[in-house]
């Protein structure tokens, strides 16, 4: 008997034909979403599901799907899926990274150019018959894109594709990530506040999670230049739309190009009153070729998962029984948080990058994060949030390069207690500080293995 799968939305026929060769397919051949109740009912006897970013798969729906083995998102972002809840039930979750990088970067470029040169507003004005005379100092004086500074918040694969395009425009590229990316060339890692202050175009490319909710709000917008533009093709909720509308209305920033919104498709109607914002309906990956590649990629994941192989884009490898991390970490994974001074200065942050790299080289699925004390503001809680969002249930904090008398050694137990209050059920332990640079790499790599083996 073939495994049973649900496809929650109308897709290309070719994809459904391919799935039908392997599965008994329950195809919701419709552009409208299934309600939560319909989704639950249709998942009751399914082994796999292929879903899109507006389908929420949470613990409650999973509880009604006892036979489900795999959930394949047809999207790279997966904030619609509760991955820890999937892991707890042994359900594999997958996404579609890679295939949409260039298309999404193209869309960033389309919005960036449109915002800088007011293309959409000028089109409307021309169509409305308002062009009566050509003027040298007309109302359409825009911003140059060439030789300007683009600031990319979240330098992942799509961020790198954006940076590549920026170089063709002779732009200066700055970026901010949790940790500097040593492999990224011709782009400079900067602190977040430096990025907001210096970029002519701030491009948001971070995934949505509780940790990135309203990452850009009133304070961040206030740091931007009055001539700057904000471009968001990542996820709604990362930007505080109410704060953005105020900043656009007061001309605190020059413009915005937005493909994603809080509560989309129900946009804040105040956006419609503004002539300095370009709005598109979440179409970052929407070309025929790319949507086909995404659907086929999700199909590959589904087919692999239900034929006993590891799906190529597995988000929760601990669901695989013989995974190097599978045996000892399900359902709540162990994680390491490297904590110390350093984010202000990329050179100080470098050892964290190296240590993290050394651990991941030994175990690519280990959960390792860095948190820093920057200008007296510990990012401890944010780092813990990120680990918990990835499924961590026990976090060992390793203070790095901390002077014996550093006040942070005293503060750490308090920070750990506050974070445990915040995340009920997550255990946070403090390891002895690691201080000698020469031995840190090996010590940490061994430490990671010891932590894992101890399970
Ligand atoms: C994604 O894949 O996450 C995109 O937002 C879909 O267009």
Image (cartoon, helix red, strand yellow):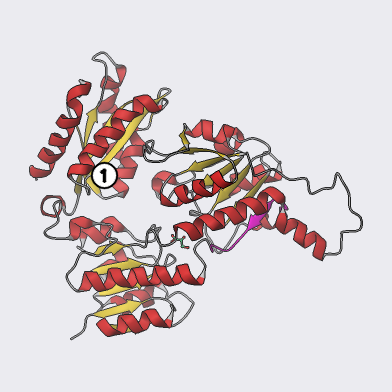
Please count the marks in the image: 1
Is 344 magenta? The answer is no
Q: Which residue is mark 1?
A: 424
Residue 246 at what x, y percent from top left?
A: 65, 44
Magenta residues span 273-283
Image position, residue 338 (x, y; %): 26, 32
Give whichever of 162, 224 is nearer the camera.
162
- Residue 358 in the figure: left or right of residue 94: left
Q: Is residue 2 visible?
A: yes
Which quadrant holds the N terminus?
A: bottom left
| Percent coordinates x, y for residue 285 in the rendering | 49, 63
For numbered disc 1, what is the local secondary structure?
Answer: loop
Rendered residue at 29%/57% (across/down): 83
* Residue 422 placement, left or right of 243: left
Q: Nearer the viewer, residue 222 or 231?
A: 231
Answer whether residue 281 is magenta in the image. Answer: yes
Q: Nearer the viewer, residue 124 or 267?
A: 124
The quarter of the picture where the C terminus appears is top left
């Amino acid at each position: 008997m073939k495994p049973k799968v649900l496809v929650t939305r109308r897709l290309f026929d070719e994809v459904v034909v391919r799935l039908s060769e392997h599965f008994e397919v329950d195809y919701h051949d419709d552009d409208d979403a299934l309600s939560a109740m319909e989704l639950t009912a249709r998942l009751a006897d399914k082994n796999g599901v292929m879903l899109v970013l507006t389908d929420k798969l949470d613990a409650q729906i999973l509880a009604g799907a006892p036979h489900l083995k795999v959930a394949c998102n047809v999207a790279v972002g997966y904030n619609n899926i509760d991955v820890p809840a999937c892991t707890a039930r042994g359900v594999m979750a997958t996404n579609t990274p890679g295939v949409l990088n260039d298309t999404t970067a193209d869309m960033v470029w389309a919005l960036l150019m449109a915002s800088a040169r007011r293309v959409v507003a000028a089109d409307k004005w021309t169509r409305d018959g308002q062009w009566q005379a050509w003027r040298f100092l007309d109302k359409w004086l825009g911003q140059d894109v060439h030789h300007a500074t683009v600031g990319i918040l979240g330098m992942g694969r799509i961020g790198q594709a954006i940076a590549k395009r920026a170089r063709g425009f002779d732009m200066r590229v700055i970026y901010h990530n949790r940790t500097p990316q040593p492999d990224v060339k011709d782009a400079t890692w900067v602190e977040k506040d430096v990025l907001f202050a210096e970029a002519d175009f701030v491009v948001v490319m971070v995934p949505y999670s509780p940790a990135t909710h309203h990452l850009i709000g009133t304070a961040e917008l206030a740091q931007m230049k009055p001539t700057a533009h904000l471009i968001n093709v990542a996820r709604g909720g990362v930007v505080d739309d109410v704060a953005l509308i105020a900043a656009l209305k007061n001309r605190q920033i020059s413009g915005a190009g937005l493909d994603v919104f809080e509560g989309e498709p129900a946009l804040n109607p105040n956006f419609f009153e503004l002539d300095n914002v370009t709005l598109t309906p979440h179409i970052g990956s929407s070309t025929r070729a790319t949507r086909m590649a995404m659907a086929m990629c999700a199909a590959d994941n589904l087919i692999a998962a239900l034929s006993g192989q590891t799906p190529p884009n597995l988000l929760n490898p601990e669901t695989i029984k013989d995974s190097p991390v599978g045996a000892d970490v399900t359902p709540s994974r162990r994680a390491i948080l490297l904590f110390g001074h350093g984010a202000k200065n990329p050179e100080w942050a470098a050892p964290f990058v190296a240590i993290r790299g050394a651990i991941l080289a030994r175990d690519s699925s280990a959960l390792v994060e860095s948190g820093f004390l920057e200008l007296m503001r510990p990012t401890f809680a944010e780092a813990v949030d990120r680990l918990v969002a990835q499924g961590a249930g026990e976090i060992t904090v390793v203070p790095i390069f901390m002077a014996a008398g550093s006040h942070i050694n005293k503060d750490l137990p308090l920070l750990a207690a506050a974070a445990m209050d915040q995340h009920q059920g997550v255990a946070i332990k403090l390891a002895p500080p690691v201080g000698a640079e020469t031995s840190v790499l090996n010590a940490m790599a061994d430490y990671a293995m010891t932590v894992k083996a101890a399970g």
